[in-house]
Image (tube, coloured by chain):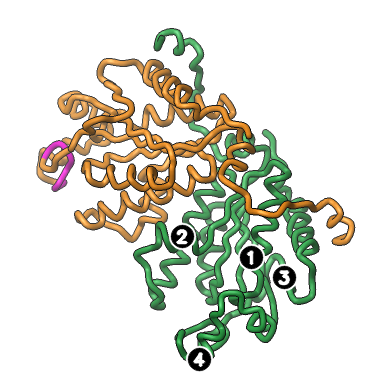
Chain colours: A orange, B green
Amino acid sequence: MVEQKATNVHWHSGEVTREDRYNVLGHKGATLWFTGLSGSGKSTVAVALEKELTARGKLCYRLDGDNIRLGINKNLGFSAEDRTENIRRIGEISKLFVDTGVIVLSSFISPYRADRDTVRALHDAGDMDFLEIHVDCALAEAEKRDPKGLYKKARAGEIKGFTGIDDPYEAPVKPEVHLHTDEMTLEQEVAILISELESRGILNFSI
Amino acid sequence: MVEQKATNVHWHSGEVTREDRYNVLGHKGATLWFTGLSGSGKSTVAVALEKELTARGKLCYRLDGDNIRLGINKNLGFSAEDRTENIRRIGEISKLFVDTGVIVLSSFISPYRADRDTVRALHDAGDMDFLEIHVDCALAEAEKRDPKGLYKKARAGEIKGFTGIDDPYEAPVKPEVHLHTDEMTLEQEVAILISELESRGILNFSI
């Protein structure tokens, strides 16, 4: 049986390239990096975009606290050093996905500009698309939403070093996309992102 | 323009599932874990399988020292603790890929049974296919091939703790696939692996 199967096996010299993988998928890989305050709507828009892309037959994957903090980064805490290592690892994982052809939706507060710039530089070095998406929402509005009750705890002093309360959020200086979630509908946000991906030629690829 | 685009945006309640991603690809994700001595032929068969799968329109990705040791794991050395952390992280990354629908070809000596069993357990916990591939080759033959000149250096004492020389290789007890690269052709090896993937229903999926 092995002999028979072998007659169907053909491969060419040279290794499979990134373009070969993009060709299998019919689109390019890219990292969309959603950054913003807790409660700003990062996950909401990432989930909505994921649904829209999947419905269009594009392969995307969300990286967030659920699958990162409980998995590969479960040996990291919240010290400054660990936060930086957390973001670095997510950046490296995102690169592997982009190299594969996946549209990565990374959704993390990622409050420090230097950390986000590190991830951007990693992508630039690999000639990969990196889109910083500022999920912008007034602190007062995010605190009013407080979906996880975290602002309340931070105000009560039960959580220390909470972004926006007693730790800074360093807003992107020149994000590829700037969403104002306290002024836009979710439909508008998704449409802006799809349009951005289209205009960059990410959603279609063939050799 | 945003308004106009928005009319094309439709999504459903509920999140995108693993099955939705497999459906986009038309196949399932799985981890093929190639383990064996240095020079046993792990990369050779992984590269050949990658070519065959890509030619068949399947999305696969190789994880190896090049893209792992120089990227996410560049802050790890070769102490026992670091070797274990190296394999743990690769296992977690493999899981993220399998969840996405990618056929992962992980090619590492991974000499310790406990480390490989950890990766297997991670996959089992996530209800994911994990195939341990023993890339088996007599030490004498691997040492004769010595493609990187490492055995020579190990015999000369220039490299310490080299697997097979002064550090043990713990062979898999019950691997899903056992390749004897000193007795089989590359075509046979690839055919066996394709057959194994087919018989497990990994190469075709639709909702």
**Which residues make up the magenta segment?**
A159-165
| Mark 3 or 1, nearer chain start | 1
Asked which secondary structure carries label 1, the reply is strand
Judging from the image, mark 2 belongs to the subunit labelled B
Asked which secondary structure carries label 4, the reply is loop
Q: Left of A107 or right of it: where is B167? A: right
Q: Residues within 10 Å of mark 1 (few under 14, many from 20)?
A: many
Q: What residue is shown with label 3?
A: B178
Between the residue at mark 3 and the residue at mark 4, the CA separation in whole angstroms equals 31 Å
Of badges 4 and 1, the one in the foreground is 4
| Mark 4 or 1, nearer chain start | 1
Q: Is residue A204 magenta?
A: no
Of badges 1 and 2, the one in the foreground is 2
Judging from the image, mark 1 belongs to the subunit labelled B
Q: What residue is shown with label 2?
A: B68
| Mark 1 or 2, nearer chain start | 2
Looking at the rendered structure, the kind of residue marked 4 is: Ala
Instruction: Name the magenta segment's main secondary structure.
Output: loop
Q: What residue is shown with label 4?
A: B156
Between the residue at mark 3 and the residue at mark 2, the CA separation in whole angstroms equals 25 Å
| Mark 4 or 2, nearer chain start | 2
- Depth check: give the residue in front, A61 or A9: A9
Q: Say above or below: A119 vs A71.
A: above
Asked which secondary structure carries label 2, the reply is helix
- Depth check: give the residue in front, B131 or A156: B131
Are circles 4 and 2 on residues that touch, CB within 8 Å? no
Q: Is residue A161 magenta?
A: yes
Residue at the (50%, 17%) spot, across then down: B10
Q: Could you say where residue B76 lies in the image, as x and y percent from the top left?
A: 37, 68
Looking at the rendered structure, the kind of residue marked 3 is: His
